[in-house]
């Protein structure tokens, strides 16, 4: 089961009721994996599937079902859960699905890690129904809380940069996630192999559009030859503060700051031509 730690399996003492809960949960996991119809899955979740929580069984929550839908890319089921339960489906899974409380973004980081772009878009639409800005920010910019997870302590944006997920990163940024990780994006560009280089470039392009202020990257000047060969002289110079950014980039950055969702309507050749297009021309 994906939420159990392998280190726990050898010494756990299972009660009959707990074993029954685990059997029903595993059956549900298989049903989602096999992409059974939505009505069948909801009947199972509401009437048959149980989760062991705090020493007693309880029904499966919509957020726990959404986790399964994310893992297996069951888009129809994810669409139903988000449409029916809205923000309630985005709350962090309880029980053995996690071992500690995080910032509210664990399902978003899962969507990024598995590169479920379509479902992530549905999640962004659901977040529009957040009445309070603080609650919306908690989902978009919260840190994944489980110390045993691969994404522990990272925001969805940081995970998108780390894994070079440009389409996920674009969705997060145009919906108001905090742009961060420019240093990580530069390092990722340098360490990525040829097959990943284009995706890493696109992530850097997006961050450079959305960061509120382009800070001078003095770290680039420590190894100028390394970065000039990767970025090109023109990009290297304006990232180091030696020359101003091109006018088109400045215009796109102004658009990203004042109306971020308008960026989503622009064609890719505009969004992704900066900053690295100059190196390729």
Image (cartoon, rainbow, N blue to C red):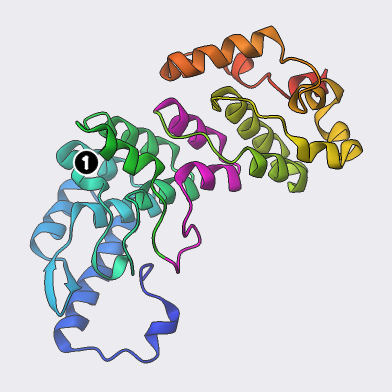
Occupied quadrant, residue 250: top right
Which residue is located at x 46 percent, y 57 percent? Answer: 153
Quarter of the picture holding the C terminus: top right
Residue 27 lies in the magenta-colored region = no
Taking the spot 64% from the left edge, 26% from the top edge, the residue there is: 214
Q: Nearer the viewer, residue 72 or 280?
A: 280
**Residue at figure coordinates x 77%, y 40% from the top left:** 219
Residue ranking furthest to the left: 47
* Residue 155 on the magenta span: yes
**What segment carries the magenta color?**
147-175
Tag 1 residue = 87
Report whether 50 appears left or right of 137.
left
State the residue in front, 188 or 120: 188
Residue 173, visible in the rendered structure:
yes
Residue 224 position within the rendered picture, expressed as x and y whole percent measured from the top left: 88, 36
Q: Quadrant of residue 122?
A: top left
Q: Eyeballing the image, is 13 above or below 135?
A: below
Circle 1 crowding by C-alpha within 10 Å: few under 14, some 14–19, many from 20: many
Q: Position of residue 143 (x, y in %)?
A: 42, 51
Query: What percent of the width, then of the height, locates residue 221?
Result: 84, 36
Say which quadrant the N terminus sits in: bottom left
User: Horizontally, is 34 left or right of 162 in the view?
Assistant: left
Whether residue 163 can be seen here: no
Q: Is residue 241 left or right of residue 118?
A: right
Residue drawn at x 38%, y 39% as measured from the top left:
140
Placement of 52 over or under 273, stated as above or below: below
Q: Viewer-proximal residue, 175 or 192?
A: 175
């Amino acid at each position: 089961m994906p939420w159990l730690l392998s280190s726990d399996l050898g010494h756990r003492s299972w009660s009959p009721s707990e074993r029954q809960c685990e059997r029903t949960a595993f059956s549900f996991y298989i049903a989602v994996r096999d992409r059974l119809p939505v009505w069948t899955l909801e009947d199972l979740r509401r009437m048959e599937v149980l989760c062991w929580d705090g020493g007693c069984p309880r029904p499966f929550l919509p957020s726990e079902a959404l986790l399964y839908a994310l893992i297996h890319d069951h888009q129809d089921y994810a669409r139903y859960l988000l449409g029916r339960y809205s923000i309630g489906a985005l709350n962090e899974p309880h029980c053995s699905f996690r071992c500690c409380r995080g910032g509210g973004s664990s399902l978003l980081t899962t969507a990024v890690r598995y590169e479920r772009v379509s479902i992530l878009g549905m999640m962004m639409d659901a977040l529009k129904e957040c009445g309070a800005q603080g609650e919306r920010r908690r989902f978009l910019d919260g840190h994944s809380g489980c110390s045993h997870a691969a994404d522990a302590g990272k925001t969805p944006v940081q995970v998108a940069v780390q894994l070079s997920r440009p389409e996920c990163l674009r969705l997060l940024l145009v919906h108001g996630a905090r742009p961060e990780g420019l240093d990580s994006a530069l390092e990722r560009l340098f360490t990525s192999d040829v097959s990943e280089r284009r995706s890493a470039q696109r992530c850097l392009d997006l961050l450079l559009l959305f960061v509120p202020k382009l800070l001078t990257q003095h770290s680039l000047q420590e190894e100028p030859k390394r970065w000039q060969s990767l970025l090109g002289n023109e990009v290297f110079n304006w990232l180091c503060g030696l020359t101003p950014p091109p006018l088109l980039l400045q215009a796109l950055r102004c658009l990203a700051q004042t109306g971020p969702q308008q960026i989503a309507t622009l064609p890719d050749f505009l969004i992704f031509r900066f900053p690295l297009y100059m190196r390729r021309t």
